[in-house]
Image: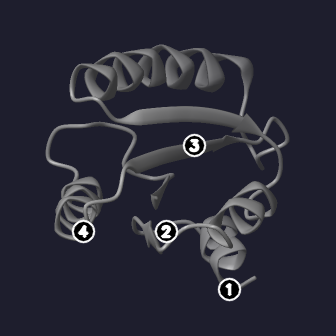
Amino acid sequence: YVLYWMSAAQRTRENHALQHAISISNHMQKPLWVIFCLFEKYPEANERHFTFMVEGLREVSLNLQRQGIKFTVVKGRPPDPILLLQDKSCCTVLDCGYTRTVRGWRKE
């Protein structure tokens, strides 16, 4: 499978990393698996932020399901869940990390 770690671009429209992952998946003739890490201790996040984010992720899930793309939300501190899954993937795609926290996870 091709693994796409969705983080900053929590949408299916105008998501260049998702489009790139779909292209790779089609070219390699492998299924695409989109993963989102839900980290409840994200710095400066609050309940309102998480409520808004989860509502958006429901829409992402429905849109990906319509396209036949597997989508999973995993709880845990990034990049730990991704590191476990990328070992079995033929390719891992990431979107941009804009915050210092996310950039730090990517360096791990």
Q: Nearer the viewer, residue 104 or 20?
A: 20
Residue 11 location, x and y as percent? Answer: 31, 37
Relative vertical location of residue 102 with respect to residue 10 in this rendering, above or below = below
Mark 3–mark 2 contact, CB under 8 Å? no
Coloration of the structure image? one colour
As helix, strand or loop, the secondary structure at mark 3 comes to: strand
Residue at 21%, 29% (x, y): give it. Answer: 67
Mark 3–mark 1 contact, CB under 8 Å? no
Separation of residues labelled 3 and 2 (CA atoms): 13 Å
Q: Nearer the viewer, residue 43 or 54?
A: 54
Residue to which mark 1 is pinned: 107
Separation of residues labelled 4 and 1 (CA atoms): 23 Å
Residue at 23%, 19% (x, y): give it. Answer: 66
Residue type at mark 2 is: Gly
Dividing the picture into quarters, in which one does residue 10 lie? top left
- Labelled disc at residue 24: 4
Separation of residues labelled 3 and 1 (CA atoms): 18 Å
Residue to which mark 2 is pinned: 97
- Labelled disc at residue 36: 3
Q: Quadrant of the C terminus?
A: bottom right
